Image (tube, grey):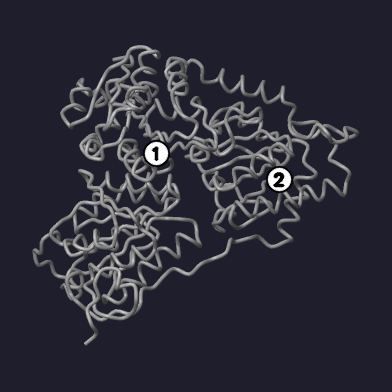
């Protein structure tokens, strides 16, 4: 019988491991240093090995919070977030977070026990028994892999990390049957996901894209979350082309939103949609161009659409690509920029005025946007939302004055976020704004802030939520208090579900079930071991936020809003 392996010796080669240790060994071998989750009766063998393998653990108060924390950790660190749950209800609790990670292309690995290998189809009343955990998770994850031996665990984890490295990142689930979790079985050397070079498009497609951009007179850029690793190339292309830049929620800040060509997160606004409809070439990078990006029907684009995406399926989904560039946005856009510049050199300059290209010959028709035109478009954009958003703008400006350039802001599906901070709190590439797009879950901001702060304790991390969304995960204030690191959470309190209240009123209905009884959120924060205060002016918010950023533990800052009951 093979000898038992312990601790770091388990990386060396073959031996005997329990299923729990085999999971932890595989995680550590792939560089995992942090995990989130809640221990339960069925996963104790796994928890037994976390510390010996150097994996730190954070215990949220609910599995959904663990999922959102791991999601925030992954988005900020660039490393997969890892969650450990137990069976049955715990795994279902995390399903909403898995669905959100799938929607936003976040690499998330969920590990759980499952029913024993030979568990009968007929119900037996086993603790946490359910008909099929794998079928439940397949509905929201990229895959759910149930292993059949301890030795297969390493391959299952390697499969997950291979997906993270080679495909559009999505959440995955690995299930270890209960009897394998405790069983000691022979295993081989630890399996590792293979190193993979960047995916690049074929030269013909790259040439077609460069040619289309060369001929463009009214180009535009649409940037999604998949463009984040290509920030510098996106900005260079925008300046070369004189192209206005619009982003999705996940693309917020890829190009500095204070740049003269930036229109920020504004795909949903009529003035911007009209501008895109008038563009003759649109370069869309790392975005689905989906209904959840434009908050309504997709715009009618009449120009040539160049799509850049790691996922080939995006080339014919939503708005089909006229020119498809499949690959990693970073090296791909660098190659596209080089091809465009080489064409410029051959042709003696595209003959247009625009930011960053004042040295080019001006002997042809103007190409790209005049800076004054972008300024006018930005004014038209703001005028369309002024009545709805104006009361939040002074508070958002106060936050911007206080926050560092590399601050991380976690968001919720709340009016103060999608009508407020997304379009009106400017960020640059150094900062991050984490928003639950697409799936549109509630309760994301607070646990995601915990995950982001765990990943980057040296950076400012601020949660932004509404009173309704906060109460989906308010118990995670206790988790934040245990870290203990400064985590301010700014809550705009409109007395319930303001968006749904307004939708009901717009239909001519009498609002129902949307007004929530007042909660003393500051007292609640203190009860969980944190701090709490209420502010009634932008100046008070700036002062409270400054103090909270230098105070250990969470500080819940409530901004009361009018509730039109």
Between disc 2 and disc 1, the foreground one is: 1
Q: Residue furthest bottom?
A: 1
Which residue lies most toward the left here? 125
x and y percentages locating residue 293 in the rendered image: 50, 39
Count residues near mark 2 (Cα–Cα under 10 Å), then give few for <14, some for 14-19, many for 20+. Answer: some
492 to the left or right of 49: right
233 sits to left or right of 184:
right
Closer-to-camera residue (559/117) = 559
Quarter of the rendering occupied by the C terminus: top left
Residue found at x 79% / y 45%: 214
Residue matched to label 1: 458
**Residue drawn where x is 15% and y is 62% of the image:** 42
Question: Can you identify the residue that label 2 sits on?
Answer: 304
Give the vertical position of 311 relative to 194 (above or below): above
Q: How many marks?
A: 2
Where on the picture, by quarter, is residue 450? Answer: top left
Alpha carbon distance from label 2 to label 1: 44 Å
Label located before the other in sequence (2 or 1) = 2
Q: Are marks 2 and 1 in contact (CB under 8 Å)?
A: no
Residue 87 image point, x, y percent: 19, 59
Percent coordinates x, y for residue 23 in the rendering: 28, 66
Identify the element where label 1 is drawn: loop
Q: Position of residue 277 (x, y in %)?
A: 66, 35
SS for dot 2: strand
Q: Which mark is residue 227?
A: none
Q: Residue furthest right?
A: 363
- Crowdedness near tag 1: few (<14), some (14–19) or many (≥20) residues, C-alpha within 10 Å: few
> Which residue is at the front of the view, 143 or 300?
143
Relative to residue 313, is residue 258 depicted above or below?
A: above
For residue 186, above or below residue 541: below
Query: Would residue 235 be found to the left or right of residue 462 on screen?
Result: right
Q: Give the position of the N terminus as an image quadrant.
A: bottom left
């Amino acid at each position: 019988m093979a000898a038992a392996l312990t601790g770091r010796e388990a990386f060396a080669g073959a031996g005997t491991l329990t299923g729990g240790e085999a999971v932890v060994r595989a995680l550590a071998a792939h560089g995992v240093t942090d995990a989130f989750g809640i221990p339960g009766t069925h996963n104790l063998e796994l928890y037994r090995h976390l510390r010996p393998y150097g994996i730190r653990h954070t215990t949220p108060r609910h599995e959904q919070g663990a999922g959102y924390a791991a999601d925030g950790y992954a988005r900020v660190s660039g490393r997969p977030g890892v969650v450990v749950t137990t069976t049955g209800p715990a795994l279902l609790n995390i399903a909403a977070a898995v669905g959100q990670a799938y929607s936003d292309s976040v690499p998330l690995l969920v590990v759980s026990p499952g029913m024993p290998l030979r568990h009968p189809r007929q119900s037996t009343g086993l603790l946490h028994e359910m008909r099929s955990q794998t079928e439940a998770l397949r509905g929201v994850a990229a895959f759910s892999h149930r292993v059949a031996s301890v030795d297969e665990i390493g391959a299952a984890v390697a499969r997950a990390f291979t997906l993270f490295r080679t495909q559009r990142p999505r959440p995955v689930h690995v299930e270890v049957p209960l009897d394998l979790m405790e069983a000691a079985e022979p295993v081989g050397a630890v399996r590792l996901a293979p190193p993979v070079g960047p995916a690049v498009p074929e030269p013909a497609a790259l040439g077609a894209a460069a040619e289309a951009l060369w001929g463009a007179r009214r180009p535009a850029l649409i940037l999604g979350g998949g463009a984040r690793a290509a920030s510098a190339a996106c900005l260079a292309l925008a300046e070369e082309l004189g192209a206005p830049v619009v982003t999705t929620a996940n693309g917020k800040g890829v190009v500095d939103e204070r740049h003269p060509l930036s229109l920020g997160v504004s795909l949903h606004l009529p003035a911007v949609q009209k501008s895109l409809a008038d563009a003759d070439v649109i370069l869309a990078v790392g975005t689905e161009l989906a209904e959840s990006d434009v908050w309504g029907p997709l715009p009618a684009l009449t120009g040539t659409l160049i799509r850049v995406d790691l996922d080939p399926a995006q080339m014919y989904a939503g708005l089909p690509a006229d020119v498809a560039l499949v690959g990693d946005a970073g090296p791909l856009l660098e190659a596209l920029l080089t091809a465009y510049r080489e064409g410029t050199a051959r042709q003696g300059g595209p003959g247009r005025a625009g930011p960053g290209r004042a040295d080019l010959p001006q002997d042809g028709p103007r190409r790209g946007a005049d800076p004054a035109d972008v300024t006018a478009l930005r004014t038209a954009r703001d005028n369309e939302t002024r009545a709805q958003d104006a009361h939040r703008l002074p508070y958002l400006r106060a936050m911007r004055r206080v926050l560092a350039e590399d601050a991380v802001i976690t968001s919720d599906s709340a009016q103060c976020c999608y009508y407020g901070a997304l379009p009106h709190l400017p960020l640059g590439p150094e900062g991050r704004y984490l928003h639950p797009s697409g799936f549109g879950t509630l309760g994301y901001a607070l646990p995601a802030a915990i995950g982001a702060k765990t990943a980057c304790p040296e950076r400012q991390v601020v949660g932004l939520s509404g009173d309704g969304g906060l109460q989906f995960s308010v118990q995670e204030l206790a988790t934040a208090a245990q870290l203990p690191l400064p985590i301010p959470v700014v809550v705009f309190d409109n007395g319930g579900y303001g968006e749904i209240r307004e939708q009901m009123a717009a239909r001519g209905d009498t609002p129902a079930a949307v007004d929530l009884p007042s909660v003393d959120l500051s007292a609640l924060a203190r009860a969980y071991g944190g701090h709490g205060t209420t502010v009634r002016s932008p100046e008070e918010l700036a002062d409270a936020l400054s103090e909270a950023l230098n105070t250990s533990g969470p500080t819940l800052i409530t901004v009361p809003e009018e509730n039109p009951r």
